[in-house]
Amino acid sequence: MTYSKAKSETTIIIEKAELAARKKDWGQVADYLQQEPDLSGRQKLRTSLDAENCSQSLDLALQVLFYGDFQEKWAIAKIIPHLGEIVVEPLVAILENQLIDIEVRWFAVKILGNFKTQIVVIALANLLQNTEEEELIEIASETLSHLGAIAINVFVTLLAEAKYRKLAARALAYIRLPQALPALLSLAEDSDPEIRVIVIEAIGCFHDRRVPFILIKALKDPVAAVRKEAAIALGFRPDLCMELDLVSHLKPLLYDLNPQVCHQATITLGRMKHSAAITALNEVLSSPHTPIALKLDLVRALGWSEIDLALEYLQQALLTEIDLVIQEIIRILGRISVAKLQEQATKILVDFWHSITENNRNPDLKQALAISLGELGKTQAEDVLQQLAKDDNSRVRLHAIAGLKKMKLRQS
């Protein structure tokens, strides 16, 4: 194909595409642009041809990207990369404009993934830093991961520049490829607490032998947000509980001055599913100085731990705690899903019912009991549910009757 013939064909196609654009027939525009001679196949012609036609083709393609439906956008997104690096600057501008429709910006990210340049890498990192839209975060982080080593090398270089250091750290955290781990580990004790938070949150997903020791050290960080992220990350490593004595490291956080750190330490210790962790939780639950909000967290963590010792501690708490905590214990016991513990939970609730006086059987407590015993569905609770089904309170009666029906269904 000669240059003049290629030029002529392209010019005719663009004219047809422009006519379709005036009619707002975006599917037709995409079809015409797809008929252009393959730009990648005529490298010798590109300089002159691009100067004359690429700008027009790009303008038409961007119109489809803005105004076409999803399928038309999808089609044009496959064509735009063939126009070359001329498309990068306008697509980056689309990314940066928060007033533009999310779907358009999503496609802009997808297209930019075809260009392995520093400009694109930084633009995607900026998007991650400045948007709260989950769809954009997902596609940007996925695109950076696909860029792989190129993106990582760019961000490792940018770590040396104060202006981009935080941006680079956040981007490396989103990439989460093994190749990014050395750079992330080097930032674990950075002077900027925000960077430490980013790093500690990110490295928790790596099963690398160096990571747990860094997380344990981070439990003593002076910044509460770092301690919290370290506790969260360790919650996914119950396999290391005994080997690294995680209970001893996590236990002090139950007394942390920051309520969020206490909350997360409670959840993490519950996930350890170890008697030492359960005992640590119970020690705080038993203290009269523990805030009610934390007691509620502790009750939930004990219930979710799926250990019989935890249920024993909850049984003790039923006799000593205030009504709000008692009702939460009753609810948690009713949600026990492990078959071998359901009998134990039912017995605890039945024994509790018989241990309290009529004066202490308030409607909220009775309703909670009716719901939990019904959920557990064990026959030893039938007598209690029968009593509750005759209660003066209509809500209690309703839940007790529903519980009895559930019990009969399970038996049939």
Image: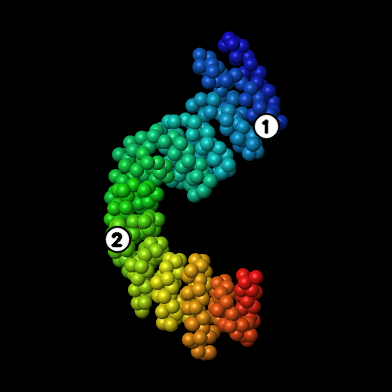
Mark 1 closeness class: few <14, some 14–19, many ≥20 residues within 10 Å = some
Q: Quadrant of residue 239?
A: bottom left
Q: Quadrant of residue 83?
A: top right
Compare residues 76 and 284 and report the one nearer the observer.
Answer: 284
Q: Residue furthest front?
A: 412
Q: Quadrant of residue 390?
A: bottom right
Which quadrant of the rendered structure holds the C terminus?
bottom right
| Element type at mark 1 | helix
Looking at the rendered structure, which numbered label has been put on residue 27? Answer: 1
Which quadrant of the rendered structure holds the N terminus?
top right
Where is residue 117? Give x, y as percent.
43, 31
In the depicted structure, whether residue 359 falls above or below residue 101: below
Q: Residue furthest right?
A: 23
For the residues carrying marks 2 and 1, which lies nearer the camera in this image?
2
**How much space separates mark 2 and mark 1, taking CA atoms?**
62 Å
Compare residues 205 and 95 and report the one nearer the observer.
Answer: 205
| Element type at mark 2 | loop
In the depicted structure, whether residue 139 falls above or below residue 253: above
Residue shown at 36% from the left, 48% from the top: 207
Looking at the rendered structure, which numbered label has been put on residue 245? Answer: 2
Residue shown at 40% from the left, 49% from the top: 205
Q: Amino acid at mark 1?
A: Gly
Compare residues 87 and 208 and report the one nearer the observer.
Answer: 208
Where is residue 136? Give x, y as percent.
51, 44
Q: Amino acid at mark 2?
A: Asp
Mark 2 closeness class: few <14, some 14–19, many ≥20 residues within 10 Å = few
Residue shown at 51% from the left, 42% from the top: 139
Where is residue 244? Give x, y as percent.
29, 57
Residue shown at 66% from the left, 25% from the top: 32
Q: Are marks 2 and 1 in contact (CB under 8 Å)?
A: no
In the depicted structure, whether residue 131 falls above or below residue 18: below
